[in-house]
Image (tube, rainbow, N blue to C red):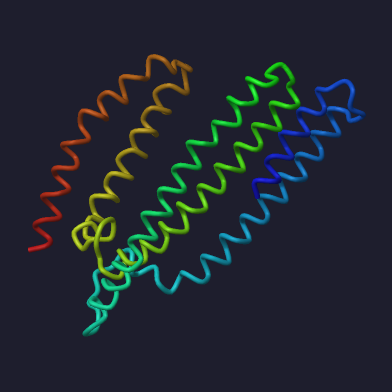
Amino acid sequence: MYSFTDMFFILGAISEDTGMNISEDAAGGIGMILMLILIAVAVAIFIYSGSKTAPFEYLEKEVFETEYGVTGMVKERRDSFKDAYVRNNIIGVSLCVMALIPLFGGAAINGENDLFMVFIFCVSIVIVGIGVVFLIRAGIIWASFEKLLQEGDYARAKKKQTLKSLIALVYWLVATAIYLACTLPSESWKEGWIVWVIAGVLFPAVIAIANTVENKNGK
């Protein structure tokens, strides 16, 4: 995936180099083709992954009870995976930080060569990509344990906050609609800032009311 992105940047740099026999339009066309390929592959992966995980979406939203012995087994596996989880996070974060080293090194070696600096920038993107793979892979496995144990972001209390989440979503959509209704006719975008101030002041009160209603319904 990152190779397509790198190629896009490299083609742009090559088109700027007068010594290369490639026009700006040709570079842009090739870059767009690569970008569309990248998007198509990503969409295919999302659809395939979604079809595989769809039967287990209730684990994220609904409160459930596990059968006898399941919780203990999951905790045991989570504890055995903890060292690998920490190690993958350390590697991922370290790679993301060290991705800046090629940029600084390239600037020190030959910072005036645009094509060289774009190549170095692409190297940095690849390093970041590798680091993100470590973070995501470990994070997905750890999140699966939290879903089964109903801990962390998937705790029972958080699953019951659906009403508050829905109210918050509708509230900010309405605030956006009011802002557009006030500013679109006169195109007074700057003067419309007062809508966001009022919305921000009223939001805690709306959430407090939502909590009260939610607590009453829970009793």
| Number of residue marks | 0
Quarter of the rendering occupied by the C terminus: bottom left
Report x, y in % for residue 93: 44, 43
Instruction: Tell me if 203 is positioned left or right of 77 in this view.
Output: left
Q: Name the outermost residue toward the right.
A: 21
The reply, left or right, for residue 57 in relation to residue 137 is: left
At a point 63% along the width and 21% down the height, the residue shown is: 107
Foreground pick, 46 / 199: 46
- Residue 15 x/y as whole percent: 82, 27
Viewer-proximal residue among 82 and 17: 82
Q: Residue furthest bottom?
A: 68
Q: Is residue 6 above or below residue 148?
A: above
Q: Is residue 10 above or below residue 112?
A: below
Query: Which quadrant of the view contains residue 147?
Result: bottom left
**Residue in view at x 43 percent, y 54 percent:** 88
- Dividing the picture into quadrants, the one containing residue 41 is bottom right
Is 95 located above or below residue 117 in the figure? below
Q: Residue at x 19, y 42 (%)?
A: 207
Please report the residue visible at 47 percent of the width from the left and 21 percent of the height from the top. Answer: 185
* Along the viewing direction, whichever of 45 and 182 lies nearer the viewer: 45
Percent from the top left, x then y, of residue 17?
83, 22
Q: Position of residue 40 (x, y in %)?
A: 68, 54
